[in-house]
Image (cartoon, helix red, strand yellow):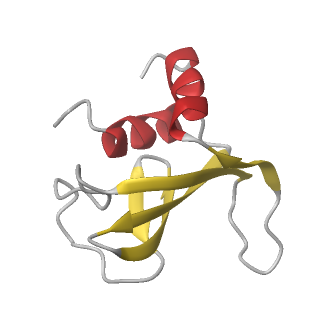
Amino acid sequence: MTNSINRRLEQYTLKRPQEVLLVKVEINGEQDEVAIFRGFSSSLMRATAFDPDIPVIPHEAIIISIDRLKAPFVPESPQYIEQGLSVEAIQTLLAEAKV
């Protein structure tokens, strides 16, 4: 579980605290959007567990796209760095950050 995509994205934001990741996922046929900032994940559409060891993006989730934004995240005026990244594209960034 320590190498799950959820954990790696959280580790990425710890190393890049000036960024927020917005991850669009499908979990059991339902869409969700997850914000990841400074090592923490939170669903923007459903309840998030209080236990940080419970992944917000479960292993079986399908990642649709990932957006990189400048922190702090302001929903009314988001500042995008990159939009619509695929899992393959984010893997390069994760490797560069050594996570």
- Residue 85 sits above or below residue 44 on the image: above
- Looking at the rendered image, the quarter that the N terminus falls into is top left
| Residue 94 rendering spot, x and y as whole percentages | 51, 26
Name the residue at 80% across, 54% down.
80
Camera-side residue: 86 or 78? 86
Total numbered badges shown on the rendered structure: 0
- Residue 90 sits above or below residue 18 on the image: above
- Residue 16 sits above or below residue 49 on the image: above
Name the residue at 72% across, 53% down.
69
| Residue 41 rendering spot, x and y as whole percentages | 40, 59
| Residue 78 rendering spot, x and y as whole percentages | 79, 67
- Looking at the rendered image, the quarter that the C terminus falls into is top left
| Residue 65 rendering spot, x and y as whole percentages | 58, 53
Q: Quadrant of residue 76?
A: bottom right
Camera-side residue: 91 or 21? 91
* Left or right, residue 26 beside residue 52: right
Q: Quadrant of residue 11?
A: top left
Q: Residue furthest front?
A: 29
- Residue 8 sits above or below residue 69 on the image: above
Name the residue at 45% across, 82% down.
45
Name the residue at 23% across, 53% down.
60
